[in-house]
Image (tube, grey):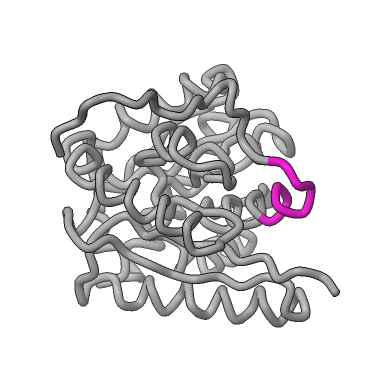
Amino acid sequence: MVKTIKIVDLVPIIYTEGIQSAIDDRKNLGRKLKEETNGLVELEVVTIEKGTASIEGAYDEALNTPYILEKIKWAEDNGYDAVVLDCFGDPGLDAGRELVKIPVVGANQASIHLASQIAGRFSIINILPETETLIRGLVTKYGLIQNLASIRTINVPVLELEKNPELTIRRMIEAAEKAVVEDRAYAIVLGCTGMSPIADAMEKALKEKGINVPVIEPLRAAIHTAIMLVLMGISHSKEAYRPPREKYRLL
């Protein structure tokens, strides 16, 4: 009998009413995955108990990381097969990999590597000016800065993305069109997992404008990467991400 693959979709912020539609989107995705895989994949959506309502910079990430790590450890202790960090900033990714043996997958890392594989040159649709430095730093860290055509910013905070979806989609389409035409991007990576519920509408609108490049939604890229790792029976290297040494820590 094939073992069910249990994946935690860790939304690394506290729950507020502003993210309910995003949570619903992830639950719908979980149901779709379970149906498409004939019950092979189960997706559990969780948030953190303490922290910020969104992550839009290094400060938010620093505040939330201890609680993110708690959830990653909880996932391993409760028999889950992998954890996906549902944020384009990959908060706590390295520390989480040091902490556990099960795969921990970052949405940024998974999506930009996928874009590099299938297109070589890609642009990122970013939410705010203050997140651009964080994103550029991650692309550099992951060794793909030479593949980055541009970062195009739409100036919409995370929790505002779905409040006016028509405005958000319009700005995303404008940014993507400029990235392809002016920056010569061959793929578009959505630079926030909060864009997940409107990703399909954006891709459809781009095709109607004759822009036929892959649009990569980072959460789905991360989830499918996690499934691949579990099916292959591999995880991150514990030589690269060694467990923390025992020492006195006042927490």
Residue 98 horizontal/vertical position (percent): 46, 33
| Magenta stretch contains residue 39 | no
The answer to whether residue 178 is visible is no
Q: Front-most of 188 and 40? A: 40
Q: Predominant secondary structure in magenta?
A: helix
At 41% from the left and 79% from the top, the residue drawn is 24
- Residue found at x 17% / y 54%: 51
Q: Between 97 and 127, which is closer to the camera in this rendering?
A: 97
Residue 132 seen: yes
Note whether 96 is above or below 166 in the view shown: above
Identity of the residue drawn at 52% across and 29% down: 183
The image quarter in which residue 204 lies: bottom right
Quadrant including the C terminus: top left
Quarter placement of the N terminus: bottom right
Q: Nearer the viewer, residue 65 or 183?
A: 65
Side of 21 relative to 105 (left or right): left
The segment highlighted magenta reads 227-234
Left or right of 155 on screen, residue 216: right
